[in-house]
Each structure stands twice: as C-alpha cells, then as structure tokens.
Amino acid sequence: ANGEIDYFNRQWMEFTGMSFEQMKGWGWQQFIHPDDVADNLQQWRQSLQTGEPFEFEHRVSRHDGEDRGPLSSAPAMRDAKDRVAMWIGSNTDIEELRQAKEEAERASKAKDKFLAALSHELRTPLTPVLMVAAAGRDEERFAPDVRAQFSMIQRNVELEARLIDDLLDITRITHGKLRLHPQNCDGHSLLQSALEIVQDDVANKQLTLEVDLAAERSQLSGDPARIEQVLWNLLKNAVK
C-alpha cells in the first residue's frame, strides 16, 4: 500500500535485463529514462496519496539498451473498509503504436501541405481561362449562341475552381466541418447548367433526354455549387 514494489514477473525482468533484487522497493527507477523519472515519481506519489489509479507513459531501457515506451498503470486494490491494501500494476509496451501514431500525424501534415500547394497550382491556369470566357460572354459582336457557349465555359471553370477548393476540404470533411455557402438560387438554372455538362455524353450515346421545367416555385435555399454537383452526378450516372 505504501508504493514499494514487492513483485515483478519473469517477462518484465527479461525485458529490462535486471534482477528482482535490483528493482524491488523503489529500485525500479533505474530502468526508467532519466528525463521521465521526476514526472513518474510525482504522479505515482499523487496516486499513493489520493488512491486514484496510476497511469503514465514513459521511456524505459530494454535489456539491449534500446529505449521503449511502455504504458504503466496500477489500480488500487481495496479492503472491506475501502482502504488501499495494495496496488497491482502492469507495463504494456506501446512503442510501435506510438510510432505508428506519430507517423500518421506526420503523413497527415504532409498531405495537408501537398493539397494546399496542389490547389494553388491547379487554380493558377484557370484565371486566364475565366478572363477569356467572361470577355467572350460580354462581347456583343459575337452571335448569341457563341456568347452562350462562353457563358457555359465560365460557369464550368468556376465550378472546377470550387471542386479544387474541395481538395482542401478533405481534412474538414473528416472533422464534420465541410464549408457550405448557402444562398437563394434557382433550381431550374442549376439543372440547366448540369445538363449542359452532360449533353455531349447524351448525344454520343444517342439517348433521348426530356426536360420538364414546369415547377412554379423553383427557388432553393442552398449551396448552388453543391446542388449542381448532386444533379451532375445523378445525370452522369444515368447516362452510364
């Protein structure tokens, strides 16, 4: 109950390469990494004073000299009067788990940096395309159908830019923080825009497409880019 160690199993003695006589009582401190001893002792003594379970991640020296990172834990065993009678501890080697976690965190940070750079590089060439498309859309000397084609190009390039931004949203999606930009929009217009994207595929497959825009109330409150994505995916799947 006073925190002196009176037992180590054979596996732990083989792990440390030390005998029980070397580790009993408070001698166990010598196989713990010097930088972790003070914090370990502070937390262990706090558990002894309060009776709260002990749990601590630290570094210990294996018999071959390699530092490993076990998780040490010890709940208090109590008698009939709820007094601490003894502590039963365990040491679990979680070094590989810790290394895997650190590697996953490094990979996640590298991915975020890569996606940020990629997003910038992908958006850069779209800027002059948008400028030309906007100029063609507003050029009164062009025929109406040509200007309509420029307008379609502009809308689709803007949608492409939004999809590129979605690359940066992957991390936000995993945390349930996908950004939406709701506004009032027209469902008929969004459907027409989605139809323009797939019309060539429809024609190539010689499909018959009927459009009925008879809804008297076609106004929507939502993110127009996301809604158009939904419609576009539905249409593409239907064509397939």
Image (spheres, grey):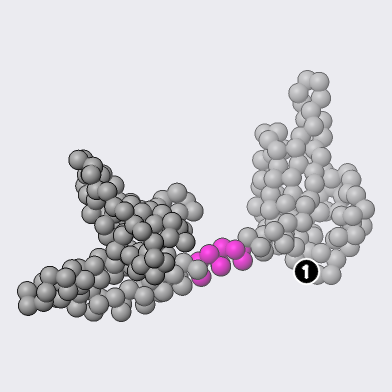
Where disc 1 sits, the SS reads: loop
- For disc 1, the marked residue is 66
Is 236 magenta? The answer is: no
Judge by depth and name the residue closer to the eye, 123 or 91.
Answer: 123
Task: Tell me: residue 112, above or below residue 72.
Answer: below
Specify whether 76 is left or right of 210. right
Q: Where's residue 174, x and y in %? A: 49, 53
* Amino acid type, mark 1: Glu
Can residue 177 be seen by looking at this rendering?
Answer: yes
Q: Residue at x 19, y 78 (%)?
A: 132
Can residue 21 be seen by looking at this rendering?
Answer: no
Task: Tell me: residue 119, above or below residue 34.
Answer: below
Judge by depth and name the residue closer to the eye, 52 or 114.
Answer: 114
Which region is colored magenta?
102-110
Q: Residue furthest top?
A: 81
Looking at the figure, which quarter contains the N terminus? Answer: top right
Disc 1 packing (10 Å; few <14; some 14–19; many ≥20): few
Q: Residue at x 34, y 57 (%)?
A: 209
Q: Where's residue 109, x and y in %? A: 50, 66
Q: Residue at x 23, y 44 (%)?
A: 214
Which picture quadrant has residue 106?
A: bottom right
Overall secondary structure of the magenta section: helix
Q: Residue at x 79, y 28 (%)?
A: 78
Specify whether 140 is left or right of 114. left
